[in-house]
Image (tube, rainbow, N blue to C red):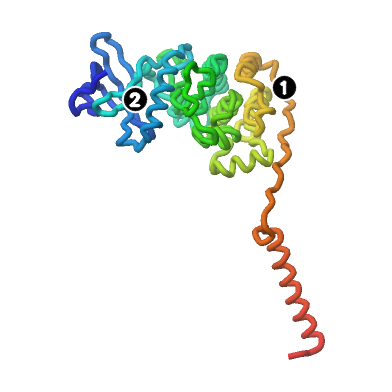
């Protein structure tokens, strides 16, 4: 695909053989445009990545394009299809040609329903997304960025999961082991599983289960279970084994089984969640199988790191208390003997 002239980002111009209709949105990695393919009579969503404009490292761009090429091979009714991807050698512009989803995102739906969606709608969207994740799980992939912005709707209301750009392809042939370095953190903190905040490379599909659970909570209650918290605060609570509140405190009409499933999906420890996305989908489609008795969320906290005595706050507080007590004793003695 060649970029023609200086009209790449201008509606009415051309991007290769595509006619730019309008700008659909923008993100940290570029802009998305609605484009026509006149020779085919079809429309596409084309994400254009500009390393110079977005500040992306060239290596990040290379890895992104490599992963996009793998995403092109992923075909499922609940995944937004990727048709083409590449990088223009003259301009440095990267592009991804995707299926156009005309009915907006789940984020748009949530803005229109600030008190939560219908129960049927929640289950329908969660089931569609879970089906996409089951396909990815079966093919050795972890999405790592399940969130309302990445759930798009087709004309018939089908929810499709998009943006595989940061997915981990565990069994992709010829994968560059540097795609995600150990210790790297990728994703959206508000929806990330605790283990993903610590090391995104080592996560499995239970991290996607967690993100889907946070999103399901938000669809039910109109707000995330960790609303108003920083990522570090959420992580600290997870390390302490503190679960999220019961969604019924905000959405009382939530069926017991669905509330129990959402709680299980968002447990701090991966071992306490459903064992796989497949297991989660089975519970969504067979609610009678959902156990209403939740596993204990209390985890054994990590050992307290050794610190020098002068950095240990408990020692400092004890020392201050001893000094204050000594001063109080001196004052009392002086008052008792009538000293000056």
Mark 1 vs mark 2, foreground winner is: 2
Other-residue count near label 1 (Cα within 10 Å), few / some / many at <14 / 14–19 / ≥20: some
Tag shown at residue 147: none
Q: x%, y% of residue 141?
A: 53, 20
135 vs 68, nearest the viewer: 68
Quarter of the image with the N terminus is top left
Q: Residue furthest left?
A: 5
Say left or right for 65 vs 252. left
State the residue in front, 45 or 171. Answer: 171
Residue 36 image point, x, y percent = 27, 16
Left or right: 25 with respect to 159? left
Q: Position of residue 75 (x, y in %)?
A: 46, 12
Residue ID at (33%, 33%): 51
Circle 1/circle 2 CB separation < 8 Å: no
The quarter of the image holding the C terminus is bottom right
Q: Note whether residue 284 is visible.
A: yes
Name the residue rendered at 50%, 26% in the picture: 177
Instruction: Give 68 or 193, whichever is nearer the viewer.
Output: 68
The percent position of residue 202, horizontal first and vertical second, equals 58, 29
Farthest-out residue, top: 40
State whether residue 331 is above or below residue 245.
Answer: below
Judge whether residue 109 can be spotted in this image. Answer: no
- Of pointers 1 and 2, the one earlier in the residue sequence: 2
- Rounded to the nearest angstrom, the CA distance separating label 1 from label 2 is 43 Å
- Circle 2 SS class: strand
Q: Quadrant of residue 195?
A: top right
Which residue was labeled with disc 1? 291
In the image, residue 177 above or below residue 249: above
Residue appearing at x 52%, y 36% in the figure: 189
Q: How many marks?
A: 2
Q: Residue 47 got which mark? A: 2
């Amino acid at each position: 695909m060649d970029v023609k002239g200086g009209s790449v980002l201008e509606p009415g111009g051309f991007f290769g053989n595509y006619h730019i209709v309008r700008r659909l949105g923008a993100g940290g990695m570029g802009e998305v445009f609605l484009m026509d393919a006149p020779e085919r009579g079809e429309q596409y969503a084309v994400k254009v990545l500009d390393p110079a404009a977005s500040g992306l490292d060239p290596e990040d761009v290379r890895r992104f394009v490599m992963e996009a090429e793998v995403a092109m091979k992923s075909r499922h009714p609940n995944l937004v299809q990727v048709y083409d991807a590449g990088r223009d050698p003259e301009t440095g512009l990267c592009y991804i040609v995707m299926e156009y989803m005309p009915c907006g995102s789940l984020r748009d739906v949530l803005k229109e329903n600030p008190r939560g969606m219908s129960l049927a709608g929640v289950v329908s969207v969660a089931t569609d997304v879970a089906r996409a994740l089951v396909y990815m799980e079966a093919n050795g992939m972890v999405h790592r960025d399940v969130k309302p912005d990445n759930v798009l709707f087709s004309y018939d209301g089908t929810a499709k999961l998009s943006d595989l750009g940061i997915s981990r392809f565990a069994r992709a042939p010829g994968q560059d082991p540097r795609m995600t370095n150990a210790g790297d953190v990728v994703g959206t903190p508000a929806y990330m599983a605790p283990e993903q905040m610590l090391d995104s490379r080592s996560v499995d599909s239970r991290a996607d289960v967690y993100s889907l659970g946070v999103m399901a909570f938000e669809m039910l209650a109109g707000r995330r279970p960790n609303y108003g918290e920083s990522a570090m605060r959420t992580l600290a609570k997870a390390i302490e084994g503190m679960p999220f509140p019961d969604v019924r405190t905000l959405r009382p009409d939530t069926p017991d089984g669905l509330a129990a499933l959402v709680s299980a999906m968002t447990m701090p420890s991966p071992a306490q969640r459903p064992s796989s996305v497949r297991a989660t989908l089975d519970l969504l489609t067979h609610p009678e199988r959902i156990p209403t008795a939740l596993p204990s969320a209390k985890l054994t906290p990590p050992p307290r790191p050794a610190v020098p005595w002068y950095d240990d706050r408990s020692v400092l507080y004890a020392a201050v208390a001893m000094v204050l007590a000594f001063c109080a004793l001196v004052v009392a003695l002086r008052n008792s003997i009538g000293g000056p």
